[in-house]
Amino acid sequence: MKIICVGRNYAKHIEELNNERPKDPVLFIKPDSAVLPDKNPLYLPPIANEFHYEVELVVKINKIGKFISQEFAHRYYDEIGLGIDITARDLQNELKSKGLPWEKAKAFHNSAVVSKHFIDKNRFEDLNNINFYLKKNGKIVQEGNTHQMLWKIDELIAYISKFFMLKKGDLIFTGTPEGVGKMDIDDEFTGFIENKEMFKIRVK
Ligand code: MG
């Protein structure tokens, strides 16, 4: 299993980090070892000083495929979940400034929070109108809706599968809306899709 993450998929998040709006989706991979085990507290590794949360809608792939056309992309997923793409921001900025790959800042142990449960996609009236949000210590810090995505789920699957063969169980992190910020020890994060709590984690 692998995680394919999409960077810069929400215009306001691109602005808040002063990034350039990309011509094509920005992609990177997290290995299966990045997934935070269920119920574990989140221990941030001693590799950076500043860790950021990025709440993202997560699509679970249900079968193998490559070069999937956008028209048939909907056949490759049944379920939607929620996750946090944890980012070692100071390390990422250092790597970016040197033109180096981001992996060390993005793919480390416990860098992927993934909800235990996923929601059947047929329970949503419109996949391009799903609300999700993240609370930090009980206060909403990020809110997004899939209609704000620069590339929608089916477009992402078509694009990603040109480069990476998708396999059953792979997860696509579809990008974060604005409002990213710091994670500190003792912070508690709860993630919601349409008012359904999807995960709760505490930083240790
Ligand atoms: Mg992200």
Image (cartoon, helix red, strand yellow):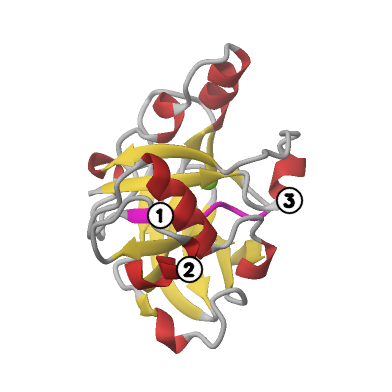
- Earlier sequence position, callout 2 versus callout 1: 2
| Residue in view at x 40 percent, y 23 percent | 47
Q: Is residue 20 above or below residue 117?
A: above
Residue 204 seen in this snapshot:
no
The CA span between labels 2 and 3 is 25 Å
Residue named by callout 2:
71
**x, y percentage for residue 100?**
50, 16
> Residue 172, which numbered label?
1
Q: Is residue 69 left or right of residue 149?
A: left
| Residue in view at x 24 percent, y 57 percent | 64
Q: For the residue labelled by badge 1, is the local secondary structure a helix, a strand or a loop?
A: strand
- Earlier sequence position, callout 2 versus callout 3: 3
Q: Is residue 178 left or right of residue 27?
A: right
Residue type, label 3:
Ala
Q: Nearer the viewer, residue 152 or 71?
A: 71
Residue type, label 2:
Glu
**x, y percentage for residue 117?**
31, 73
Residue named by callout 3:
11
Q: Is residue 115 above or below residue 185?
A: below
> Residue 92, which numbered label?
none
Residue type, label 1:
Ile
The residue segment tinted magenta is: 171-177
